[in-house]
Image (cartoon, rainbow, N blue to C red):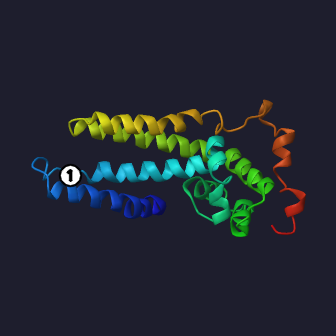
Amino acid sequence: AEYCNMVIDKTGGLFRLAVGLMQAFATECKSTDFAPLVNNLGLYFQIRDDLINLADEEYFKSKSFCEDLTEGKFSFPIIHCVRKDESDTRLLSILKQRTEDTDVKHYAQKLMKEAGSLHHTREKCISIKNDIVSQIEALGGNPPLLSLIEKLDIQVEALGEVVSVPSSPHGNPSSSDQKLQQPPDKQLDEL
């Protein structure tokens, strides 16, 4: 809730300012309340960015791999993972390092995937996107805005398999799950 409120204040605030300026000079819809739509747009853009930063291979080609970890950012999936099991401090330790080590970042990514945090974030994006589409339609429709949202959602939809929670037969941890219990050897002292 705190994260969403912060995003609504930050990103949503910029969007509300832009919409407010347009409404000030508009000849129609001067009194229409666009705040719920604009707030959801802000949430969608930020949470989508958080997900793509930590899960999308194409993004990694143009920017650095898992940049949010290097910056020590508490993004939506990181917060979800940390809160899922507050006794597990591995991801927090990695975040505090502000590491650029790719092996450690891969390990952190696996922790988030195993905790279901990347999947949860994708599901949150889909839910907000559906709310946005409904809100646009309720306000009379806007084909260019709907088209933009659909184009932005292509990346989110494509991450379905990438962010799925790994499962192992018979509910027993697989050997790869057991490997996740310890961070890469070269980082043990830093954690």
Where is the N terminus found, in terms of image quarters? bottom left
**Residue 12 x/y as whole percent:** 36, 58
Relative to residue 140, is residue 99 drawn left or right? Answer: right
Count of numbered marks: 1
Query: Given the current orientation, which residue lies at the most extreme right position?
Result: 185
Q: Residue at x 64, y 54 (%)?
A: 81
Query: Does residue 83 appear to the left or right of 153 in the view shown?
Result: right
- Residue at point 20%, 36% (across, down): 140
The kind of residue tagged 1 is Asp
For the C terminus, give its image quadrant. bottom right
According to the picture, the residue beneath numbered tag 1 turns out to be: 33
Residue 67 lies in what quarter of the image? bottom right
The front one of 5 and 149 is: 149
Q: Residue furthest front?
A: 62
Specify the farthest residue to the top: 169
- Please tell me whether residue 45 is drawn above or below residue 94 in the rendered image: above
Which residue: 70% across, 67% down?
A: 98
Relative horizontal placement of residue 95, taking residue 10 as reference (left or right): right
Place of residue 44 in the rendered image (x, y in percent of width and height, measured from the top left) = 44, 48
Name the residue at 68% across, 52% down: 65
SS state under label 1: loop
* Residue 126 drawn above or below residue 41: above
Q: Relative to the observer, which residue lies in front, 102 or 186?
A: 102
Q: Position of residue 28 (x, y in %)?
A: 11, 47
Left/right of residue 14 with respect to residue 66 in the rendered view: left
Q: Image quadrant of residue 137?
A: top left
**Alpha-carbon neighbours of circle 1 within 10 Å: few (<14), some, or many (≥20)?**
few
Q: Position of residue 78 (x, y in %)?
A: 61, 56
